[in-house]
Image (cartoon, grey):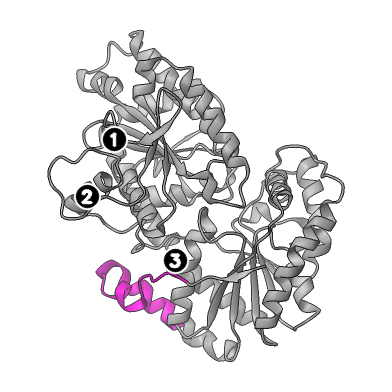
Amino acid sequence: MAFVVDVPASACLRDYEAVAHLAHDVEELEETARGVRPKLSGRKIWMVNSTAQGGGVAEMLPTMITLLRDLGFPTEWAVIESSEPAFFDLTKRLHNMIHGEGSHELPSGARELFERENESNAAFLAERMEPGDILIVHDPQPVPLAGMISERVAATAVWRCHIGLDFENASTRAAWDFLAPFLEAYDHAVFSTTEYVPEAFTQRASVITPAIDPLGDKNRELHLHKMVGILTNSALVRSPSPLVTPPYDDVVNRLQGDGSFRPANMWDNIGLLTRPIITQVSRWDRLKGWRPLMDAFVELKRRFANGADGEQAWAYRRRLDLVRLVLAGPDPASIQDDPEGRQVIEDLHAAYLSASPEMQDDIAVVTLPMSSRRENALIANALQRASTIVVQNSLREGFGLTVTEAMWKRIPILTNSRACGPRHQVRDGVDGCLVTNPEDPDELASMMSAMLGEHRNRDIWGLSAQRRVHSEYLVFNQVSSWLRLLGRLV
């Protein structure tokens, strides 16, 4: 049965207005809200997804909901639940199929399972909704809700799909065919880019790009003492001196050479305060391209050890010698809607253990604690800010929030042109760099090597990236777009 999330506290409108470079964005958002408020009067907005933590949707919703409430629009957040493991196995398969991956056949009884597990969630929500309310359902897991709720209470229903693929194959067609009967109940759909809109929604779809909260714990500025404190309290670095704040109850664990996960600073510092660092922070999803990125880093180090870059400047060779790779993701046991996470960790586990001890020293596979949403966000923030390059090597990506986060922090980003979302976000050679094949270790290694050697350009890319995020990918634009859309629909 679903549950209503107690939305964690986040910045209010006045907090953003107090920041000089955000004040104008707040003024424009409030102007939009004034025009829409009479149309939505008496209606409550219900945001529904499948997890309260982990992944981009769960990260975006608290700030969106806080701002909507602050602007005078009552909004609730509900999360569906299922005690049947096969349900999330099915929805993960659908997720991969929409990305064009995996088998194009679903197991027998899939539709019955999909409907059965959503039915109790629909009953829970229908009891709490009033006629005229607005239902916004995120992604495939809860997609049957609109039709089930409409049988009980009249509501405006919008499906927000955060994933997609910019071409068709047998897997995508099978996924959309499976979802088609459920999607008929929706008045409108929202996608991250026009390439993702399926034919069934061509006349009732809008594009709203995901966005970040510039004052959220994952993106706010961190002064030096705060950043070092976070890295130390989370066990990512050893304390250089006494700290005011105590260590976190749950800390970052690092994969060790004996196959266990222990606190990341137990035996050796990763080098976040002194070394060049290449980082990817994401969910443990095969489509995030973890294994090719690890293989590419091994190739980068192999080239250096063999003297392939011996003619370059001393400082550049020193960076290649000292650079380390950090692969960071959430504790997979904490995310119930992603059963594939454990399998990805096990694959990286095996690849890491097969590497030489020297290579193991230079690769840190770490799991971030999820017991505290705030601490998890601060750890990711500090980890990105301690990085020389942030990578998002997704084979498929609807929209890369981690890409936007790095851009906002002025950290050079390396991603690829094959993933539709990131190639819209990052202009090659302007905001960062793109590779053409995220599964080619040679190309990835060459690009990482080149970026490490581009000291001045890394600064230029970072500044350009931050400007782009400010103009297009902050939460104010996202909320304004939603308000304008809902004002039209009702």
List the residue tagged with mark 1: 265
Q: Is residue 344 left or right of residue 367?
A: right
Q: Nearer the viewer, residue 461 or 387?
A: 387
- Measured in 3D between alpha carbons, the distance from the residue under mark 3 to the one under mark 2, in whole angstroms, is 28 Å
At horizontal 37% and vertical 16% (from top left) the residue drawn is 357
Q: Amino acid at mark 1?
A: Asn
Of marks 1 and 2, the one in the foreground: 1
Of marks 3 and 1, the one in the foreground: 1
List the residue tagged with mark 2: 229
Residue 365 coordinates in the image, percent (x, y): 42, 33
Say few, some or many: other residues with alpha carbon within 10 Å of mark 3 (under 14 / 14 to 19 / 20 or more): many
Of marks 3 and 2, the one in the foreground: 2
List the residue tagged with mark 3: 475
Residue 67 coordinates in the image, percent (x, y): 44, 75
Secondary structure, magenta segment, majority class? helix
Q: Nearer the viewer, residue 95 or 454?
A: 95
Image: 237 above or below 322: below
Residue 173 coordinates in the image, percent (x, y): 80, 47
Residue situated furthest right in the rendering: 108
